[in-house]
Image (cartoon, rainbow, N blue to C red):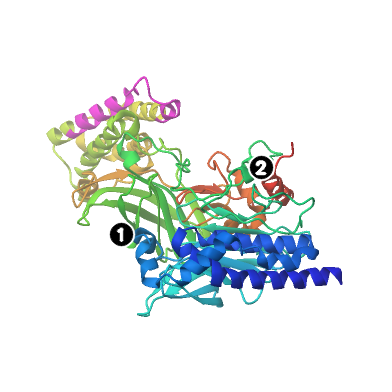
Amino acid sequence: MIKNRAGLLALIVLAAASLLMVFFVLPRISQDAKPIGEAINAAGDAVKEAITDPQQTAKAPEAPKTGDQAAASASSSSTKPDAAASSTQPATQAAAATPSFDVLRVEPDGSTVIAGRAQPNSKLEITNGAAVVAKVDVGPSGDFAVVLDNPLPPGDHQLVLKAIGKDGTAVTSEETATVSVPADKSGELLAMVTKPGKASRVMTMPGQNPASPSQPQASQPGAGLPATISPASAPAAAVSDAAGALPGLPAASSNLASSAPNVGAASPVPDNGASADLRVTAVEIEGAKLFIAGVAKPGASLRGEADGKPVGNAKAGQDGSFVIEGLTDLSVGDHRISVESLSAAGQALLRVEVPFNRPAGEQVAAVAGSSVSTSMSGVDGGAFDKLRSETARAFNLLKGLYEGGKTPTAEEVAAARSATGIALKSLAEYQLPADASAAARPITDAAAKDAAAALAALDALPKDAATFGAGLNQIAGMVGKAVGPVIAYQLKSGAEMAAAGTGDTAGAKTIQQAPLTQSERNSVIIRRGDTLWQISRRLYGQGVRYTTIYLANQDQIGNPDIIQPGQIFGVPEEYRPDSEELHRQRLRPKRS
């Protein structure tokens, strides 16, 4: 009975506090420009006090009626609405055009209070998936507050804001509120707001104390009550001391970064060469969807193609990473994936091509090798790649003399043979600059060794033109091995080489990249708006198991709350048995 009475009193206090907020606090907000989140937090604190000490319930509704607030109410009644509206900042009204969350307060039973900003004088809908769970009219200030009619049931929820203007135009929030309501008291309650390209903002965490520093703390506040963080006054100290039983598991983020930090991409590329300007790092197939991930110059406009057919367009982020996605039906077998960097007029400035073998299956991922395995342009200014291309071109010209059953003259054979020999000799003697990375040397050393072997085989062929032509097929494989798999793809006919060997596609320089290889373990390309929580829920059934993915990719993830589009994470088939405990340890404050 006592618990039921306390719960009933808490609901009464919440309703009373909401009424007080609407009729007394909101008029004050339009004058002092304080976020509406402070009013919601005050209402939530009143509920907490009611549950902690039911004897004080009758006094709780009177808390907002301080002298200052009473004066504010009186003055607001004498102030004309148009005067108040004229005092608001135009920038604030413009920002409010896109709905956003300021406060997301969720109780353990699923009761939810939401406050934020939207287009002034619009009608706001809050949706949970396809269902509309609440509607509210937004006032002239653009601020709104709403209590969901029905508590959210246990489970995971995705809340989105949609503002409908007087002209019927609908604007959907870029932010998404992810709420996980526990099925029982022992479960963990969590609510966070995510936005593409931004750090996740944790709004409700287990064990967080909602009391403000200026308030005396109760002896034992209700353990089930969540904390609320408003963007205007989010106390970083609330989670900065989060415990880490594992040294590599950082504390949870509590506030929204102004911009996404530079977190290492899946395959970092040097920033001083052609390969750094444009590179494909992975291709993923999910049913009929094709995803192309890579790195380019920050802000570059990009176009993706598969076998010359358009896939989609994208723009590189601030860190240069990009993900192009589209619907395309790739059959099992060999394909060519390409990405073009476009000018403002839509002309291709730079193009990268990469062979891709599509295996059978609905979920397929293939990744690029090391950053130096395909193009050495970032290491030596392109000298090594140029030697390989010249070798392939010379050998193709030599083979072309015998196409269609033709028999070339001795002079033609001597000239083409000499050009091929010189190219092979130059490749065999090539040496990297002294400051080149150690990872690049095995590639050039192997190419030099293979080029020397091909040169020896070429020199061993007879001088007679007819006999010499028959022996060319014997060394074609050796030359292909020396120039690498991508350039060896060009070793077909002289006509094909004349088109492919120029390195131009409608005037654009083309980078030939080594074939992608199927990932040895399950991989996932991070897309805009993804969070580890969402990926974990999709793969492992529960978002709280995200620590499994984090610990498997610590070399790429500086903060589990901040992941970048275009990153490629290896995903273990099974989640860690201790993943939920690791999550709790990460959120649990240290005790002095």
Asked whether disc 2 touches disc 1, contact meaning CB atoms under 8 Å apart, the reply is no
Which residue is denoted by mark 2 in the rendering? 242
Q: Position of residue 523 (x, y in %)?
A: 54, 51
- Find numbered disc 2 in the image and state the secondary structure of the residue it sits on: loop
- Find numbered disc 1 in the image and state the secondary structure of the residue it sits on: loop
Residue 466 in view (yes/no)? yes
Q: Which residues are magenta?
A: 416-443
Image point (19%, 34%), residue name: 416
Q: Main secondary structure of the magenta part?
A: helix
Please determine whether, in this image, residue 347 is positioned above or below residue 155: above
Image point (29%, 45%), residue name: 490
Q: In the orientation shown, which residue stands out farthest toward the top?
A: 434
Q: Amino acid at mark 2?
A: Ala
Tell which circle, 2 or 1, labels the residue nearer the N-terminal end.
Answer: 2
Please determine whether, in this image, residue 558 is positioned above or below residue 119: above
Foreground residue, 383 or 90? 90
Please determine whether, in this image, residue 520 is positioned above or below residue 544: above
Query: Which of the numbered marks, if any, corresponds to residue 452?
Result: none
Q: Quadrant of residue 132?
A: bottom right
Please determine whether, in this image, residue 552 is positioned above or below residue 573: above
Foreground residue, 552 or 374? 552
Q: Position of residue 439 (x, y in %)?
A: 45, 29
Image point (12%, 33%), residue name: 411
Which residue is denoted by mark 1 in the rendering? 308
The CA span between labels 2 and 1 is 51 Å
Q: Position of residue 96 (x, y in %)?
A: 41, 64
In-image side of 33 versus 236 (left or right) = left
Q: Position of residue 285 (x, y in %)?
A: 48, 60
Q: Quadrant of the C terminus?
A: top right
Foreground residue, 229 or 541? 229
Foreground residue, 194 or 485? 194
Residue 103 in view (yes/no)? no
